């Protein structure tokens, strides 16, 4: 039996779709792997992430598991990846000492296939028969850490897009107005998020006031659940 188990970490939310979405990912991963697999959230759950990790550890330690690989299903190396998750993992580790080891691996956004998948999603919704190809905006959550936003800017550049952010400038409205000022009226917007949810719905609402000025299409998030799980399992 493999001595490593896998624990996905997502941001979490008060929106119940967030927890249900994580459970879907865990179910898909279990169907594709022989590992013991579970998951938890930083926010939106009655237990802290450390407590969720401890609960999983108690469930699987009797099966000969010696290591739990903690995989942040997050796209940017913001505060959650750099500080919050390591702090919670350290708390969980302190409860088990040498009986079990928690190993945090690189967050999902570091996967080498991400740039190609973003470009493919833009290309999928580009009408090559049209004389005017749409301009592209890649919208990410954004971070207080400038280096995380630099990653988004590089991803946008590799997709022939410009970057926009939900939480920091330049926001989606700023970039739409920037393109309109250049007489660009055909725009595809790709949300760089793991799943559809409250923020993607809010982005759609931000785009509504501009629809009488331009042809704006909000694309689906770039990764299907199956693709997301495939990328995650390849990182173990």
Image (tube, rainbow, N blue to C red):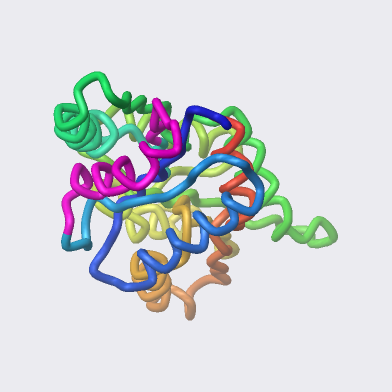
* Rendered position, 43 above or below 37: below
Q: Which residues are magenta?
A: 47-70
Magenta stretch encompasses residue 57: yes
155 over 8 or under it: above or below? above
Q: Residue at x 25, y 19 (%)?
A: 98
Q: Quadrant of the N terminus?
A: top right
Residue 87, percent from left and from top: 16, 31
Q: Position of residue 166 (x, y in %)?
A: 31, 55
120 horizontally vs 4: left or right: right
Q: Is residue 193 left or right of residue 166?
A: right
Q: How many marks?
A: 0
Residue at the image position 64 percent from the left and 43 percent from the top: 117
**Who is closer to the viewer here, 97 or 69?**
97
Residue 74 seen anywhere in this rendered image of the structure: no
Q: Residue at x 70, y 60 (%)?
A: 125
Q: Position of residue 85 (x, y in %)?
A: 24, 36
Residue 235 image-quadrant placement: top right
Compare residues 196 and 60 and report the one nearer the observer: 60
Of helix, strand and loop, which mostly describes the magenta segment?
Answer: helix
Q: Residue sitting at 25 percent across and 49 percent down?
A: 52
In this rendering, is residue 202 above or below 77?
below
Q: Which quadrant holds residue 65?
A: top left
């Amino acid at each position: 039996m493999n001595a490593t188990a896998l624990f996905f970490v997502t941001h979490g939310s008060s929106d119940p779709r967030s927890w249900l979405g994580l459970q879907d990912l865990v179910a898909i991963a279990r169907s594709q792997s022989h590992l013991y697999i579970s998951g938890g959230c930083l926010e939106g759950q009655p237990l802290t992430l450390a407590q969720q990790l401890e609960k999983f550890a108690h469930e699987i330690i009797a099966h000969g598991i010696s290591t739990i690989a903690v995989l942040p299903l997050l796209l940017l190396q913001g505060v959650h990846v750099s500080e919050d998750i390591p702090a919670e993992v350290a708390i969980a580790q302190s409860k088990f000492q040498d009986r079990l080891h928690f190993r945090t691996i690189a967050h999902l956004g570091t996967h080498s296939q991400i740039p190609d998948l973003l470009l493919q999603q833009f290309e999928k919704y580009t009408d090559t028969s049209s004389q005017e190809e749409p301009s592209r905006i890649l919208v990410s959550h954004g971070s207080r850490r400038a280096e995380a936003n630099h990653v988004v800017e590089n991803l946008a550049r590799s997709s022939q897009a410009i970057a926009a952010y939900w939480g920091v400038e330049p926001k989606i409205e700023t970039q739409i107005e920037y393109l309109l000022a250049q007489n660009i009226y055909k725009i595809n917007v790709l949300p760089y998020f793991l799943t559809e949810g409250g923020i993607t719905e809010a982005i759609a609402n931000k785009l509504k006031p501009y629809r009488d000025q331009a042809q704006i299409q909000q694309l689906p998030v770039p990764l299907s659940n199956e693709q997301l799980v495939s990328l995650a399992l390849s990182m173990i």
